[in-house]
């Protein structure tokens, strides 16, 4: 029986959503036996070994020497800073709330592009950014209550900022290597920087329960490795703007997983904040598609007018 290409794309997209939705659940379990730094290092040591096997099988290209510093920078923001901040931040948040805040990266990408790259930002996007930040505040307050907010939970927003900065940098770096090649070197570079947390990792691994170690193994294999392979497969066949819409399903799926596996309660404040955050991010993307659509229509009208004049 031949499987249709469309079904393969849907299957790969579903795998990406499930893998990345599992990430906050796996982190929550992993923190029961590991410190945030140890958890990040062990997770990406597993992912690095797996990606090395994939790289050998697919014979990916070697990086140019001049690109190594940039690949390390990408690894620092996408892996090292992002995941250490996420692990520390999730100590003060539920897995469901953490998954919502992690999806706010496009909000920070917009701020970075405006303040650092001096890119123009429309009034619509400023409204989306403001709305998204209000939604993030609603998530934090709704998760623990206004009087129980812990300072480290704000590190999840630092993780989202780091991921947003990675996207801005990657946009300038794109085109030199394929997505899978970039991901491999990004993971290896980030893991190399995480080695500062190596002391004591062996003792922590021995002392951790089998449940915790299994959760970390799954973190290393699925969200940190297989999800990137599946995502590369999808992006090779579908436009980025269309494929990225599916990513907004990650927080709801993560909330359901957290409720099922961890017994977390779906709080009304978190759900409302999630709707505001995701709504603002979707609205930003729709504006981009609307602008491209208007440009395309204007271009077609110009061509038609030129043909008529001839």
Image (cartoon, grey):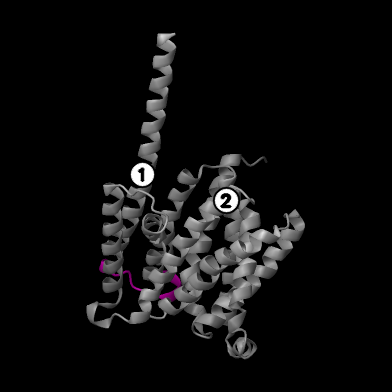
Residue 160 shown left or right of residue 71 in the figure: left
Expressed as whole percent of the image width and height from the top left, the position of residue 233 reads 61, 49
Residue stretch rendered in magenta on the structure: 260-269
The answer to whether 193 is drawn above or below residue 308 in the figure is: below
**In this rendering, would 122 be left or right of 307?**
left
Q: Is residue 268 magenta?
A: yes
When asked about the image quadrant of residue 211, the answer is bottom right
* Residue at 53% in and 47% down: 10
List the residue tagged with mark 2.
174
Where is residue 69 drawn, in percent x and y? 62, 65
> What is the x, y in percent for residue 305?
39, 15
Q: Nearer the viewer, residue 50 or 156?
A: 156
State whether residue 61 appears in this view: yes
Callout 2: SS: loop
Label 2 – label 1 distance at C-alpha: 23 Å
Q: Disc 1 on helix, strand or loop?
A: helix
Q: Earlier in the sequence, mark 2 or mark 1?
A: 2
Compared to 268, does 170 lie above or below?
A: above
Residue 208 is tagged as none
Residue furthest top as drawn: 310
Which residue appears at 32% of the width and 59% of the height?
A: 277
Q: Residues within 10 Å of mark 1 (few under 14, many from 20)?
A: few
Residue found at the far left of this picture: 147
Rendering coords of residue 123 (x, y %): 26, 48
Q: Name the disc covering residue 286, or none.
A: 1
Q: Residue at x 41, y 26 (%)?
A: 299
Q: Nearer the viewer, mark 2 or mark 1?
A: 2
Q: Relative to residue 309, is residue 137 drawn left or right?
A: left
- The C terminus appears in which quarter of the rendering? top left
């Amino acid at each position: 029986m031949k499987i249709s290409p469309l079904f393969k794309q849907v299957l790969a997209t579903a795998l990406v959503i499930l893998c990345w939705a599992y990430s906050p659940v796996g982190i929550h379990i992993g923190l029961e036996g590991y410190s945030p730094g140890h958890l990040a290092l062990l997770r990406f040591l597993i992912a690095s070994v797996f990606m090395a096997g994939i790289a050998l099988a697919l014979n990916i290209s070697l990086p140019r020497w001049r690109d190594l510093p940039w690949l390390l920078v990408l690894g620092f923001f996408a892996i090292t800073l992002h995941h250490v901040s996420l692990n520390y931040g999730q100590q003060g948040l539920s897995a469901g709330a953490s998954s919502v805040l992690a999806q706010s990266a496009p909000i920070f990408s917009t701020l970075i592009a405006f303040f650092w790259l001096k890119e123009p930002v429309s009034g619509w996007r400023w409204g989306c950014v403001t709305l998204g930040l209000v939604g993030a505040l609603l998530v934090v307050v709704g998760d623990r209550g206004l009087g129980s907010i812990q300072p480290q939970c704000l590190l999840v927003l630092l993780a989202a900022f780091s991921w947003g900065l990675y996207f801005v940098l990657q946009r300038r770096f794109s085109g030199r290597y394929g997505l899978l090649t970039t991901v491999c070197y990004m993971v290896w570079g980030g893991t190399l920087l995480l080695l500062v947390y190596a002391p004591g990792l062996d003792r922590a691994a021995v002392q951790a329960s089998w449940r915790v170690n299994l959760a970390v193994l799954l973190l290393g294999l699925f969200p940190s490795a297989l999800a990137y392979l599946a995502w590369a497969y999808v992006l090779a066949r579908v436009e980025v703007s269309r494929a990225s819409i599916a990513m907004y399903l990650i927080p709801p799926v993560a909330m359901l997983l957290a409720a099922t596996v961890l017994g977390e309660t779906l709080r009304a404040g978190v759900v409302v904040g999630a709707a505001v955050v995701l709504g603002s991010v979707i609205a930003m993307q729709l504006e981009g598609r609307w602008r491209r659509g208007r440009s395309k229509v204007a271009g077609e009208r110009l061509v038609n007018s030129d043909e008529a004049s001839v």
